[in-house]
Amino acid sequence: GNSVTQMEGPVTLSEEAFLTINCTYTATGYPSLFWYVQYPGEGLQLLLKATKADDKGSNKGFEATYRKETTSFHLEKGSVQVSDSAVYFCALSANFGNEKLTFGTGTRLTIIP
Amino acid sequence: DSGVTQTPKHLITATGQRVTLRCSPRSGDLSVYWYQQSLDQGLQFLIQYYNGEERAKGNILERFSAQQFPDLHSELNLSSLELGDSALYFCASSVAGIQLSGNTIYFGEGSWLTVV
């Protein structure tokens, strides 16, 4: 079945540091890949997505590239801010059949000033 | 604001009781999904409805049931509650029931259930 393996947290960085959160997946066919973010006390928000190999999703300074050869979708940001502190979830959905999302375990990110 | 509305936001109930969680999807979305987020299990897919019919079932216990009504709102019923059912329950919605080039699934803010 489908699965997502996500970098263990928590991750603590100083403001303006470079961020990478690793995500690899196992899936049949060609899934779509997503990063969701959960800010403290809030629900899940879509951060970015990519639907085919070599696509790059980007939003709010975050980027992730769909790498089929390494089955990865790592999240990056060049300069993090305190407001980026949240839990980040990598997820996939199969490209055929229903759309349910399979999530990774989440990575808690804390940015210190 | 994702446009997905869940009520109640917080709920405390005793073991053995039954609760109903309600979800209104985004306008125009036909699919509704229920997810459970707990500390030990992470985010788990429970069930999906599409235009009133069950489309997919995940790790949903027999004590739990759901339905989607003609106006497309959905309810998740949890019965014979146990301490381990304490979790954040998310509802989500999307336009279609079948994957079409990465349709986005939009999540509500969740319903916090505490079983004491």
Image (tube, grey):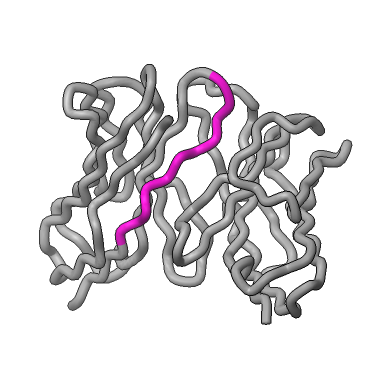
Decide whether residue A105 is among the magenta residues: yes
User: In the rendering, at what x and y percent does residue A99 appear?
Assistant: 55, 30
Decide whether residue A83 is among the magenta residues: no
User: In the rendering, at what x and y percent does residue B51 appear?
Assistant: 78, 30
Residue drawn at x 79%, y 62% is B79
Name the residue nearer the viewer: B9 or B62.
B62
Residue drawn at x 74%, y 53% is B64
- In which quarter of the view is residue B106 placed? top right
Figure check: B112 above or below B73? below
User: In the rendering, at what x and y percent does residue A17 appear?
Assistant: 11, 62
Total number of numbered discs in the rendering: 0
- In which quarter of the view is residue A15 placed? bottom left
Figure check: B30 above or below B21? above
Quarter of the picture holding the C terminus of chain B = bottom right
Outermost residue to the right: B70
Figure check: B67 above or below A31? below
Figure check: B48 above or below A51? below
Judge left or right: residue A59 versus residue B64: left
Name the residue nearer the viewer: B18 or A43.
B18
Q: Which residues are magenta?
A: A97-107
Q: Main secondary structure of the magenta part?
A: loop
Judge left or right: residue A30 versus residue B17: left
User: In the rendering, at what x and y percent does residue B74 appear?
Assistant: 78, 47
Residue drawn at x 38%, y 21% is A28
Residue drawn at x 67%, y 74% is B10
Quarter of the picture holding the N terminus of chain B = bottom right
